[in-house]
Amino acid sequence: DGPGAGWGFLSATTVRAHVRCCFGNFLVARVGNAAGAEEAFRGVLDDEPLHATAAFNLGVLLERRARAARGTDGPAYERDRKGAAAMYRRALKAEPHHMSALVNLAALLQEDGWDVAGAELLYLRVMTPTGGPIIHRGSPNGPPPDEPPLAALVNFAQLVADRGDDPERAVTLLERALQRDGGC
């Protein structure tokens, strides 16, 4: 970790974390090795507990594994779902405006009515960004969008509709999604 050990001004630990995240993504996307990817992401988090990318990617992996266990292995489903939520929260602790982590955590909390109030608070955060940098997958430092992601609009509309107390709000959210998407 001494001078010259990393890429210019980056430390060797930062470079190593980046490479391990890329390797984990490669393993899961190209090789289908989710266990190897999980090991890579957990290795990054062992070195840097608040590494947003590793936490988010591990959350996605755990959420996929939970969905695969749904209906067949209740304890594994609950363990991985809770683990995914914890990883999304860790990513948000590191980068409070990590849009993908916000949206994924909100959808996960909304699922099966697990924590609808928590999901609503997250969707409200997505709908009204605080002006800080919004972090997107694929463009780490991109400018904040004019509108929240379509998935957030649609999921939030579903939450409001399911709650049943504000149908006009649900319609407004869906209309916003249709305008954003260019209509049906």
Image (cartoon, rainbow, N blue to C red):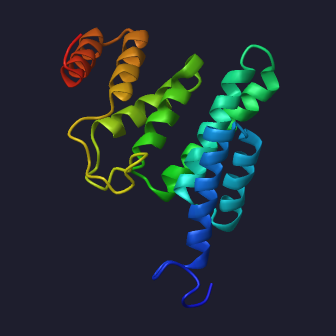
Q: Which residue corresponds to the image point at 56% horizontal and 63% vertical from the top-left?
A: 18
Can you say whether 19 is above or below 150 in the image?
below
- Residue 103 screen position, x and y as percent: 44, 35
Q: Which residue corresponds to the image point at 42% horizontal and 18% vertical from the top-left?
A: 159
Which residue occupies the foreground of this view, 128 or 34? 34
> In the current view of this chain or complex, which residue is farthest to the front?
30
- Residue 23 screen position, x and y as percent: 64, 54
Q: Left or right of 168: which side holds 137?
A: right
Please state, as top left, top right, bottom left or bottom right, where the C terminus lies in the image. top left
Q: Left or right of 141: which side holds 103?
A: right
Please state the total of marks drawn on the protein image: 0
Which residue occupies the foreground of this view, 65 or 92? 65
Please state, as top left, top right, bottom left or bottom right, where the N terminus lies in the image. bottom right
Q: Tell me which corner region of the image, top left, top right, bottom left or bottom right, holds residue 77.
A: top right
Tell me, yes or no, if residue 166 can be seen here: yes
Q: Which residue corresponds to the image point at 33% horizontal and 26% vertical from the top-left?
A: 150
Q: Left or right of 42: which side holds 96?
A: left
- Residue 29 screen position, x and y as percent: 61, 39
Q: Tell me which corner region of the image, top left, top right, bottom left or bottom right, holds residue 99.
A: top left
Q: Which residue corresponds to the image point at 38% horizontal and 50% vertical from the top-left?
A: 135
Can you say whether 53 is above or below 106 in the image?
below
Q: Left or right of 36: which side holds 63?
A: left
- Residue 40 screen position, x and y as percent: 70, 54
Can you say whether 108 is above or below 7 in the image?
above
> In the current view of this chain or complex, which residue is farthest to the bottom?
3
Can you say whether 163 is above or below 93 in the image?
above
Tell me, yes or no, if residue 85 can be seen here: no
Which residue occupies the foreground of this view, 57 or 22? 22
